[in-house]
Image: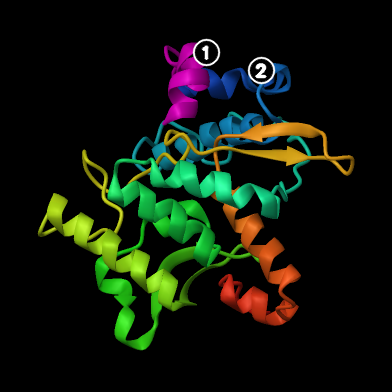
């Protein structure tokens, strides 16, 4: 939605999909000119293709063997492995405690404690939390192979404490709601960068090279860093993070 409002709509909002099909070279040039990150530029082009494929299901004027983004040469992408230094945890916890919303405070704490992908955790259903058996289920998670699967995440005493607080807050907001982390509008929370949380990424010399406000995937990276420091077996870490085995 943010990419649409900020990037896609100002450029293509008044153009039809048929027009885009006839001007695929312009779409290619536009993707190349985007000043956003390589990943964001790729997402914008892919969104155009996804919208087009969806439209062809009902609009038979649109040729199914075409795609407005078919000429785009996508940027190379590499996963960001950012994580907090251990000495940053106390300051981060103070920022966490200042968040007024129980729902959002619990979300960030559980993001760190479980190492879950933020959007997958945000979709967590109350019915998928099984505290008596010490696990919860993340639905439709992605894997490196591109498949979609459900995974069981093992819970600790600390994770269960935050889950109980989150569920109590969710039921206070909407007794009949289904999400552990409901939005005040509808559905589940979708933004993770507007709660005043931040951390610094440093180089080998200790110099700050990045300041991140979007802590979601950084908290997953921090989980891996702590697991490595505590000597958790690599295979165990993969299972605890919900990676499906080959």
- Where 116 sits versus 51, above or below? below
Label located before the other in sequence (2 or 1)? 1
For the C terminus, the quadrant is bottom right
Q: Which residue is mark 1?
A: 11
Question: Which quadrant holds residue 101?
Answer: top left
- Residue 148 within the segment the image draws in magenta: no
- In percent of width and height, residue 18 lies at 48, 22
- Residue 52's disc is none
Residue labelled with disc 2? 30
- Magenta: main secondary structure equals helix
Magenta residue span: 1-16
Task: Report the side of 139 relative to 221 (left or right).
Answer: left
Query: Residue at the spot x=43%, y=16% of the render?
Result: 13
Q: Mark 2 touching mark 1, by CB under 8 A?
A: yes
Q: Is residue 4 above or below residue 175?
A: above
> As drawn, which residue projects farthest toward the bottom?
133
Q: Is 94 rendered above or below residue 61?
A: below
x then y, percent, for residue 38: 71, 32
Within 10 angstroms of label 1, few (less than 14), some, or many (20 or more) residues? few
Is 102 positioned to the left or the right of 82 in the image? left
Residue 67 visible:
no
Residue 106: where, in percent of width, then height? 37, 55
In the image, what residue occupies the spot 32% across and 74% down?
A: 129
Considering depth in this image, is 145 or 79 the residue closer to the camera? 79
Q: Quadrant location of the N terminus? A: top left
């Amino acid at each position: 939605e943010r990419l649409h409002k900020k990037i896609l709509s100002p450029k293509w909002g008044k153009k039809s999909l048929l027009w885009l099909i006839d001007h695929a070279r312009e779409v290619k040039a536009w993707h190349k000119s985007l000043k956003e990150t390589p990943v964001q530029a790729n997402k914008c082009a892919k969104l155009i293709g996804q919208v087009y494929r969806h439209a062809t299901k009902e609009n038979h004027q649109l040729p199914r063997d075409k795609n407005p983004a078919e000429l785009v040469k996508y940027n190379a992408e590499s996963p960001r492995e950012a994580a907090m230094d251990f000495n940053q945890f106390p300051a981060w916890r103070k920022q966490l405690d200042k968040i007024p919303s129980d729902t959002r405070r619990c979300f960030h704490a559980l993001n760190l404690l479980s190492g879950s992908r933020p959007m997958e955790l945000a979709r967590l259903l109350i019915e998928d939390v099984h505290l008596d058996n010490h696990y919860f289920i993340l639905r439709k998670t992605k894997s490196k192979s591109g498949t979609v699967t459900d995974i069981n995440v093992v819970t600790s005493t600390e994770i269960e404490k935050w889950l109980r607080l989150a569920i109590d807050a969710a039921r206070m907001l909407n007794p009949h709601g289904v999400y552990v982390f409901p939005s005040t509008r509808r559905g589940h929370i979708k933004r993770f960068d507007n709660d005043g949380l931040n951390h610094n990424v440093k180089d080998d010399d200790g110099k700050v090279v990045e300041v991140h406000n979007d802590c979601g995937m950084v908290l997953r990276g921090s989980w891996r860093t702590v697991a490595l420091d505590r000597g958790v077996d690599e295979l165990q870490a993969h299972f605890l993070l919900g990676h499906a085995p080959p």
